[in-house]
C-alpha cells in the first residue's frame, strides 16, 4: 500500500527540500495551495481542506509552521497533523488547537519546546533546521546565466535578508509619550547587542503594558491565548530591534573600507556606504552568492530565543563562510573558528570581519569544514528521518 501525505504549500523557503525528503522515504506527496485568509478561522479554506482530506486517505498532513485551522480540520477527521516550525515565537501556536490529539509539532527552537511543554502540550518535539547540500552545491556551481554579470554574486561581505524597515513600531512611535519612547529606545538599543537571550518581553511590565494598550490594539480571534506582551514584544519591538541592529552593523562594517553588499527587497536608501545589489532568487541564485562571497553574514532576529535560523544552514550547505551572531544552540552543533565564525556584538563583528577578510586560507578551511559538517549531520533528509521516527515512537 502506498503511503500518502498532504502538504500545505505556502511561501516557505524550505518546502521543496522537505517535500523531496518525504519522497525519498517512499511517500506520495499531494499539495494544496489555496490561499489562507486567517490562520485561526477560515471557513472557505476549512471546507476545501476537509473535502481534500476525505478524498485523499492520507497518512498525515504536513506544514512548515503551525496553522490552527489545519490542525482543527485534521482533528475533526482523525488525521495526524505534523508541523515543523521555522519561526519563533510563532503567534499562531498560541491557540487552544495546540492541544489537539492529532498534533505532532516540531520546533527548531529548544526554548520554544520547553515553553509549550510547560503549558501542557505533550506532542511537541525539538527538531533543528537543516539544509539540502546537494541542491545547494548544484545551484552554487551552475554556470552563470547568459547576460548576467558574475560580479552580481561576488562580494567581500554580504547580507541577504530583510531590514524590517516597514515595522509597526514606526507607525505608533510618534503617538507615544516621551517616557515610553525613551524607554523603548533604550531597551531596543541594549537588545541589539545582546545575543542568546531576549529582554524585550521582560521589559514589558504591567505598568508599561497598561500604557501601551492606549496606542496598540491587540486583535485576537476565538481560541487564541496570545497576549499583549507576546504580540507587542514580537511584532513591534522585535522587528524594530532587528532594523536597528542590521542597519547599524552593516554601516559600521562599511566604515572599515571593506566593500559591503546587501541583497534585499527592503528599502536600503538609509544604508550609507553599503552597495545594494537587488534581490536574488532563493533556489538558484542565493547558493551561488553564498559560495562566491568571502564573508556571509547572519543576523538573527531577537524573537528567536535560542534556535539557529535557516540562513546559517543554507550558507554553510552551499560552501560559504558564515559569520553569525551568537545563538545559544550554536555550540551544540558548530565550533567557533573551526566550521563557523561567531560574533558577540557590533565591535566584535567588525574585528572578526576585518580578520577573516585578510586570512583567506583560514576562512576557506572553515567554510569547507562547515559544508562537510552540514553534509554529515544536518541534512533535511536526516531531519525528516528523525521526524518520522519520533512520530512512530509517540503514536
Image: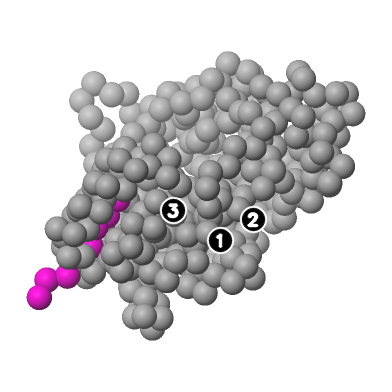
Q: In this image, 377 relative to 136: left or right?
A: right
Q: If you read the primary sequence from the N terminus, does the residue marked by circle 1 or circle 2 appear first? A: 1
Is residue 29 at least partly visible in the picture? no
In the picture of the structure, the residue carrying the numbered disc 3 is: 68
Looking at the picture, how far across and down is residue 354, in whole percent?
65, 40
- Crowd band around label 2 with a 10 angstrom C-alpha radius: few (<14), some (14–19), many (20+): many
Q: In this image, 273 relative to 207: left or right?
A: left
Judging from the image, what secondary structure is the residue with disc 1 in? Answer: loop
Check residue 2 for magenta coloring: yes
In the picture of the structure, the residue carrying the numbered disc 1 is: 109
Q: State if disc 3 and disc 1 touch (CB < 8 Å).
A: no
Region in magenta: 1-9
Q: Closest to the observer: 147 or 223?
A: 223
**What residue is rendered at 57% in x and 30% in y?**
163
**What residue is rendered at 36% in x and 54% in y?**
70
Residue 339, compared with residue 345, is above or below; it is below
Q: In this image, 390 relative to 172: left or right?
A: left
Q: Closest to the observer: 45 or 32?
A: 45
- As drawn, the residue found furthest toward the left would be 1
Is residue 210 at least partly visible in the picture? yes
Looking at the picture, how far across and down is residue 149, in whole percent?
32, 23
Which one is in front in this view, the residue at disc 2 or the one at disc 3?
Answer: 3
Looking at the picture, how far across and down is residue 85, in whole percent?
46, 56
- Crowd band around label 3 with a 10 angstrom C-alpha radius: few (<14), some (14–19), many (20+): many
Residue 313, compared with residue 232, is above or below; it is below
In terms of image quadrants, where is residue 105? Answer: bottom left
Q: State if disc 2 and disc 1 touch (CB < 8 Å).
A: yes
In the picture of the structure, the residue carrying the numbered disc 2 is: 305
Q: CA distance from mark 2 to mark 3?
A: 22 Å
Amino acid at each position: 500500500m502506498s503511503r500518502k501525505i498532504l502538504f500545505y504549500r505556502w511561501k516557505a523557503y524550505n518546502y521543496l527540500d522537505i517535500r523531496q525528503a518525504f519522497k525519498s522515504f517512499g511517500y506520495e506527496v499531494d499539495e494544496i495551495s489555496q490561499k489562507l485568509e486567517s490562520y485561526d478561522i477560515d471557513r472557505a479554506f476549512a471546507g476545501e481542506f476537509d473535502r481534500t482530506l476525505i478524498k485523499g486517505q492520507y497518512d498525515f498532513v504536513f506544514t512548515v509552521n503551525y496553522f490552527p485551522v489545519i490542525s482543527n480540520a485534521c482533528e475533526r477527521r482523525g488525521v495526524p497533523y505534523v508541523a515543523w516550525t521555522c519561526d519563533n515565537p510563532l503567534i499562531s501556536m498560541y491557540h487552544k488547537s495546540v492541544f489537539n490529539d492529532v498534533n505532532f509539532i516540531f520546533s527548531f527552537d529548544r526554548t520554544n519546546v520547553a515553553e509549550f511543554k510547560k503549558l501542557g502540550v505533550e506532542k511537541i518535539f525539538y527538531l533543528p533546521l537543516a539544509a539540502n547540500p546537494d541542491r545547494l552545491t548544484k545551484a552554487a556551481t551552475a554556470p552563470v546565466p547568459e547576460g548576467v554579470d558574475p560580479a552580481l554574486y561576488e562580494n567581500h561581505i554580504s547580507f541577504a535578508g530583510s531590514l524590517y524597515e516597514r515595522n509597526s513600531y514606526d507607525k505608533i512611535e510618534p503617538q507615544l509619550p516621551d517616557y515610553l519612547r525613551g524607554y523603548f529606545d533604550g531597551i531596543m538599543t541594549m537588545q541589539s547587542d545582546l545575543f542568546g537571550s531576549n529582554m524585550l518581553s521582560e521589559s514589558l511590565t504591567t505598568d508599561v503594558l497598561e500604557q501601551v494598550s492606549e496606542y496598540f490594539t491587540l486583535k485576537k480571534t476565538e481560541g487564541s491565548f496570545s497576549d499583549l506582551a507576546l504580540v507587542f514584544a514580537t511584532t513591534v519591538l522585535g522587528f524594530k530591534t532587528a532594523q536597528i541592529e542590521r542597519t547599524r552593523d552593516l554601516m559600521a562594517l562599511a566604515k572599515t573600507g571593506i566593500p559591503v553588499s546587501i541583497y534585499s527587497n527592503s528599502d536600503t536608501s538609509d544604508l550609507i556606504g553599503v552597495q545594494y545589489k537587488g534581490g536574488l532568487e532563493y533556489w538558484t541564485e542565493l547558493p551561488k552568492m553564498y559560495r562566491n562571497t568571502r564573508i556571509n553574514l547572519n543576523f538573527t532576529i531577537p524573537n528567536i530565543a535560542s534556535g539557529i535560523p535557516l540562513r546559517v544552514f543554507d550558507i554553510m550547505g552551499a560552501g560559504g563562510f558564515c559569520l553569525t551572531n551568537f545563538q545559544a544552540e550554536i555550540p551544540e552543533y558548530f565550533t567557533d573558528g573551526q566550521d563557523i565564525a561567531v560574533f558577540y556584538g557590533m565591535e566584535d563583528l567588525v574585528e572578526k570581519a576585518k580578520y577573516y577578510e585578510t586570512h583567506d586560507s583560514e576562512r576557506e578551511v572553515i567554510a569547507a569544514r562547515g559544508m562537510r559538517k552540514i553534509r554529515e549531520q544536518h541534512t533535511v533528509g536526516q531531519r525528516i528521518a528523525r521526524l518520522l521516527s519520533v512520530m512512530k515512537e509517540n503514536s
